[in-house]
Image: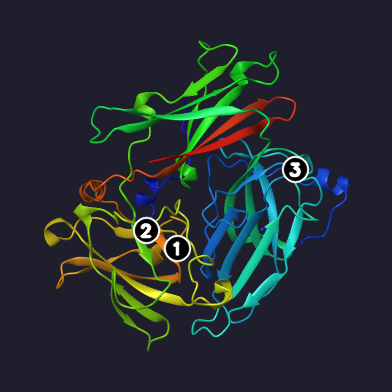
């Protein structure tokens, strides 16, 4: 079994420090160079002005970005640019195999045109922090896909595909193979709590298919970089195929994340104090204790922020929600500093760590602290550290029992020279 390569939420601990949408002829498409090989899910960093990126299916802000090929709900991409003036941007799409190696020519996976423009952008209204909100929905009259699989959408400056604004992954599924997904509890040596072992059972549509051309990958919540794959089926239930992770590859519980609701800017709950006289508004949270873990009572966000469905006090929150500077404070064991960096990742950062969300040590108070810019809404976050001891403390809190596990069935299609995504199914653990 292989686990997808690339950075992961754990790997982030060591990381401190996209011709407009006009159509090209088929001939021009064939002349386009094949994209360079990129191993694993490697996304370009967001432009420093980009905030509050959302990519999901339909109207559910916490739905995974999975598109059912030829039908089903479209995907919505939304984001803000911290600027007083907007400009049209462009989008390009890349197909990838199941290990996120970008493959194929655009003519091989785009059903209509290769690129499109984002023309739906408007400045914020009556906000102290000025920003421009962008919306893009696909498939549409310009963009559609001719093959299933893993995809990456890139937002870039018009006419400059390499001038990247942001990149995000999404999936196109055929939903051509019915399957059963179950989760079993399994005890693994060295783990304090039981792990979840996923099993998938399905029957290939074509009995003549080489069963060893199928692979099933398992995703927990929106942690795309941490997908785990079962490459060889068990044939004991033939003609059905059974795929599962070995116990040592089963999903160990993650600590409960910290939850923050800043839809209403007022003291109470986790908000210790507020300052609405400053720009941006400032919110100070109660200190978080490393050894106690995250919020035990919170809604399931699936690792994604809620904005338009959370900020009911403002009309059209996408354009009218305010940006808030949130002061986070982490108390380490013994109120003592550690060797190495300490940072915070969450829905506000795409769960990626950069210099903007590193924390500094406050010797007088005995905690790490830092300010993070968040849009009003509901958010999740976790602290991370390159110090092994502190990281262990951060992982000892109560386990997160509610997770969305998604099984993805891939078929290695020799005729298309890539992996097709033939079916997807999700199951929430509780």
Q: CA distance from mark 2 to mark 1?
A: 8 Å
Q: Position of residue 331 (x, y in %)?
A: 20, 62
Residue picked out by circle 1: 348
* Residue 386 percent location from the top left of the image: 29, 51
Quarter of the figure with the C terminus:
top left
Vertical arrangement, residue 137 with respect to residue 225, above or below: below
- Judged from this view, the residue extending furthest toward the left is 334
Of labels 2 and 3, the one closer to you: 3
Total label count?
A: 3
Tell me what residue is drawn at x 80 percent, y 45 percent.
111
Q: Are marks 2 and 1 in contact (CB under 8 Å)?
A: yes
For this orientation, the residue located farthest to the bottom is 277
Which residue bears the numbered disc 3?
70
Residue located beneath label 2 in the image: 381
Does label 2 or label 1 sit earlier along the sequence?
Answer: 1
Q: Judging from the image, what secondary structure is the residue with disc 1 in?
A: loop
Question: In the image, what residue occupies the spot 11% across and 58% down?
Answer: 334
Task: Kindly report the distance in space between the C-alpha atoms of the residues bearing marks 2 and 3.
Answer: 35 Å
Could you tell which of marks 1 and 3 lies nearer the N-terminus? 3
- In x, y percent, where is residue 230? 49, 26
Residue 61, percent across and down?
54, 57
Where 134 sits versus 222, above or below? below
| Foreground of the two, 261 or 5 | 261
Q: Quick one: label 2 or label 3, which is nearer the N terminus?
A: 3
């Amino acid at each position: 079994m292989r686990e997808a390569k690339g950075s992961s939420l754990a790997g982030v601990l060591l990381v401190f420090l996209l011709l407009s949408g006009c159509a090209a002829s088929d001939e021009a498409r064939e002349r386009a160079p094949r994209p360079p090989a990129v191993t694993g899910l490697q996304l370009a960093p967001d432009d420093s002005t980009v905030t509050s990126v959302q990519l999901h299916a339909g109207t559910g802000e916490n739905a995974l970005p999975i598109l059912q090929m030829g039908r089903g709900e479209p995907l919505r991409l939304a984001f803000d640019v911290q600027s007083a003036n907007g400009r049209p941007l462009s989008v390009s799409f890349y197909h990838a195999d199941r290990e996120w190696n970008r493959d194929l020519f655009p003519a091989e996976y785009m059903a209509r045109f290769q690129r499109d423009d984002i023309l739906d952008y408007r400045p914020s209204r009556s906000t102290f922090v000025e920003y421009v909100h962008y919306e893009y929905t696909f498939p549409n009259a310009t963009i559609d896909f001719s093959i299933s699989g893993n995809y990456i959408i890139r937002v870039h400056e018009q006419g400059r595909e390499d001038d990247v604004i942001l990149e995000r992954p999404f999936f196109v599924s055929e939903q051509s193979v019915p399957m059963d997904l179950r989760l079993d509890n399994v005890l693994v040596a060295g783990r304090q709590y039981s792990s979840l072992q996923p099993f998938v059972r399905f029957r290939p549509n074509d009995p003549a298919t080489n069963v060893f051309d199928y692979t099933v990958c398992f995703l927990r919540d929106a942690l795309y970089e941490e997908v785990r794959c079962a490459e060889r089926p068990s044939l004991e239930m033939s003609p059905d195929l059974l795929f599962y992770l070995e116990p040592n590859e089963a999903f160990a519980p993650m600590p409960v994340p910290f939850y923050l609701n800043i839809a209403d800017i007022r003291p109470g709950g986790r908000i210790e104090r507020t300052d609405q006289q400053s720009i941006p508004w400032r919110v100070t949270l109660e200190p978080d204790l490393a050894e106690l873990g995250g919020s035990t009572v919170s809604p399931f966000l699936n690792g994604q922020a809620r904005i338009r469905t959370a900020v009911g006090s403002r009309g059209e929150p996408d354009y009218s929600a305010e940006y808030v500077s949130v002061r986070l404070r982490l108390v380490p064991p013994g109120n003592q500093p550690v060797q190495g960096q300490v940072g915070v990742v969450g829905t506000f950062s795409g769960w990626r760590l950069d210099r903007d969300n590193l924390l500094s040590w406050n010797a007088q108070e005995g905690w790490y602290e830092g300010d993070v810019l968040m849009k009003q809404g509901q958010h999740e976050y976790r602290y991370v550290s390159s110090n092994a001891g502190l990281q262990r403390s951060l992982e000892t809190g109560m386990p997160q029992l509610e997770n969305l596990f998604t099984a993805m069935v891939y078929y290695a299609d020799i005729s298309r020279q890539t992996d097709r995504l033939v079916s997807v199914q999700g199951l929430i653990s509780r």
